[in-house]
Image (spheres, rainbow, N blue to C red):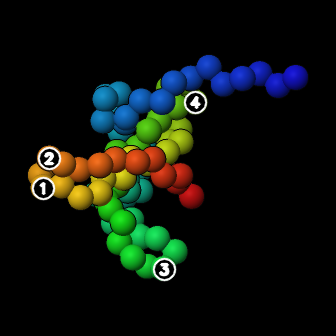
């Protein structure tokens, strides 16, 4: 039997940590689907607090200045 993960997911912006290489930070980048259609913008990274690894992307879609926007997780590649 394998051990279950014990970490929790937390937005990187709330951890006080940064991306090791700022050139690799994907926040603010456009997200497109497999057809090339824009679906949103990466708002934050959801980080495993134990492993200190990005597990999901928080993608913002719609709204104006953050009001009325919806967020959904995406998987980093």
Q: Considering only order in the chain, which callout, 2 or 3, is on the residue closer to the N terminus?
A: 3
Q: Residues within 10 Å of mark 2 (few under 14, many from 20)?
A: few
The CA distance from mark 1 to mark 3 is: 25 Å
The image shows residue 37, relative to residue 15, as above or below, that is below
**Farthest residue in the right direction?**
1
The CA distance from mark 2 to mark 4 is: 32 Å
Residues at circles 1 and 2 in contact by the CB criterion of under 8 Å: yes
Q: Which numbered circle lies on residue 33?
A: none
**Position of residue 3 measured from the top left corner of the image (x, y, whole percent):** 77, 21
Residues at circles 2 and 4 in contact by the CB criterion of under 8 Å: no
**Position of residue 32 measured from the top left corner of the image (x, y, whole percent):** 41, 70
Label 1 element class: loop
Seen at 48% across and 79% down, the residue is 35
Seen at 47% across and 35% down, the residue is 47
Label 3 element class: loop
Q: Which numbered circle lies on residue 51?
A: 4
Horizontal relation, residue 71 to residue 76: left or right:
left
Q: Which residue is mark 2?
A: 67
The image shows residue 12, relative to residue 21, as above or below, that is above
Q: Considering only order in the chain, which callout, 3 or 4, is on the residue closer to the N terminus?
A: 3
Label 4 element class: loop
Q: Which residue is mark 1?
A: 64
Q: Considering only order in the chain, which callout, 3 or 1, is on the residue closer to the N terminus?
A: 3
Q: Nearer the viewer, mark 2 or mark 4?
A: 2
Q: Which numbered circle lies on residue 35?
A: 3
């Amino acid at each position: 039997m394998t051990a279950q993960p014990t970490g929790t997911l937390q937005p990187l912006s709330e951890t006080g940590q940064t991306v090791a290489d700022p050139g690799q930070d994907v926040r603010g980048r456009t997200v497109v689907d497999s057809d090339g259609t824009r679906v949103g913008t990466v708002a934050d990274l959801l980080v495993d607090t134990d492993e200190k690894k990005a597990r999901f992307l928080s993608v913002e879609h719609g709204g104006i200045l953050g009001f009325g926007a919806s967020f959904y997780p995406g998987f980093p590649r």
